Image (tube, rainbow, N blue to C red):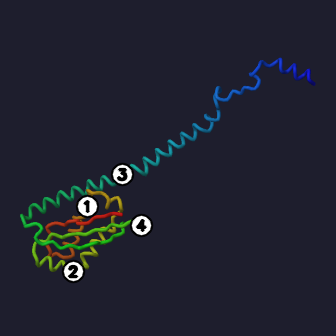
Amino acid sequence: MDKLDEEKSFDLPEGKGTETTSGKGFNIKIVLFGLPLFIIQLIAVYFITANVLIPKMQGTSTEVQADSTHIEAAQDEHSETGNEEMGKFVYVIDDLIINPAGTDGKRFLLSSIGFDIKTEQNQQELKAKEILVKDAIISILSSKNVLQLGNSLYRDTLKLEISGKVSELLPAVSLNTIYFSKYILQ
């Protein structure tokens, strides 16, 4: 038995009988499994980006663009009405807490809104019907989602919507403008 072991050891050169080919050869497993997984991931990322993320981003920007045209039209109307004294009569509704749409009560908006009014009589009428005004404001703000409420350009649109709703509820009250004295989105 010793002779066979000696013969085997002579046939193999030193160190070459125990060496493996790991690291020097091409690993076929990478091609068979890795490359298809990589391609599937690329396709998934493409479809998620193209079908989910881009439409959301474009939808937000088109809403802002459409709303900015309404803002420009309303600003033209306000500039044509005359040069009333701004800030003389301001009625403030403090600390409205609103849950934005789609948040399930996990997010909220804390807001205080000031109404710049033309006359003291309008201020008294607004004060007498404060509950109607608060309800209108809460309805408008709670119908908006967090993306809309978080967009600083959209606040001017909110002002126009609130102004239109208050003018609809109280046609005798003429508003100069609306101010957000607090606007905290959590």
Residue type at mark 1 is Arg
Q: Residue 119 vs residue 184: left or right?
A: left
Q: Residue furthest right?
A: 1
Q: Residue 170 vs residue 40: left or right?
A: left
The span from disc 2 to disc 3 (Cα, nearest Å) is: 39 Å
Q: Dot 2, how many residues are within 10 Å of its Cα: few (below 14), some (14-19), or many (20+)? A: few
Question: Which label's residue is closer to the chain start, 1 or 4?
Answer: 4
Q: Position of residue 165 (x, y in %)?
A: 23, 71
Residue at 9% from the left image edge and 61% from the top image edge = 80
Residue at 33% from the left image edge and 68% from the top image edge = 142
The span from disc 3 to disc 4 (Cα, nearest Å) is: 23 Å
Asked if the residue under mark 2 is in contact with the one under mark 4, i.e. CB atoms within 8 Å, the reply is no
Residue type at mark 4 is Lys
Question: Which label's residue is closer to the chain start, 3 or 1?
Answer: 3
Question: Which label's residue is closer to the chain start, 4 or 2?
Answer: 4
Quarter assignment of residue 135: bottom left
Question: Which numbered mark, 3 or 1, is in the foreground of this view?
Answer: 1
Q: Position of residue 72 (x, y in %)?
A: 18, 57
Question: Which numbered mark, 2 or 3, is in the foreground of this view?
Answer: 2
- Pointer 1 residue: 155
Residue type at mark 3 is Met
The span from disc 3 to disc 1 (Cα, nearest Å) is: 18 Å
Find residue 106 and name its label: 4
- Pointer 2 residue: 129
Using the image, determine if residue 61 lies above or below residue 79: above
Residue type at mark 2 is Lys
